[in-house]
Image (tube, grey):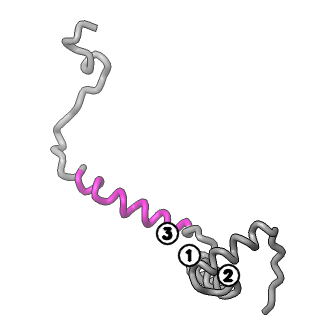
Amino acid sequence: MTLNIPLSPDKEARLRARAAALGTDPTRFVLEALEAKLAEPNGNGADSSEARIAAWNRFLAPMHDWTKKLPADRRMDDSSDAIYQGRGE
């Protein structure tokens, strides 16, 4: 497949400069960038919703485990009266 991608002179200059800095030609640079993008989940750089949910659950798991270790009969009074008690306010 052959693609023709119109680039502004500024983008073309930036592409050529970046490719030259890496010691490659612009075509190879674009192909490698495309391959890297296609290798990402969904091919668009965004994780699927299932992957985001799984990551969130992995993040929460240690906190959930920690809360199971708290005493069941322990209660905390977080009312404003309790918070400011003894402060003269």
Q: Tell me where the magenta segment starts and ends, as one range.
A: 49-66
Answer whether residue 86 is magenta in the image: no
Q: Residue at x 55, y 69 (%)?
A: 47
Q: Residue at x 81, y 78 (%)?
A: 5
Q: Amino acid at mark 3?
A: Ala
**Label 3 belongs to which residue?**
51
Mark 3 vs mark 2, foreground winner is 2
Residue 89's image quarter? top left
Q: Quick check: 31 above or below 12?
A: below
Answer whether residue 55 is magenta in the image: yes
Looking at the rendered structure, which numbered label has been put on residue 41? 1
Q: Residue at x 59, y 70 (%)?
A: 45
Q: Position of residue 39 (x, y in %)?
A: 57, 81
**Label 2 belongs to which residue?**
30
Q: Viewed as shown, does residue 24 lie left or right of 78?
A: right
Counting residues from the start of the chain, the first of labels 1 and 2 encountered is 2
Q: Amino acid at mark 1?
A: Pro
Q: Residue at x 60, y 75 (%)?
A: 42
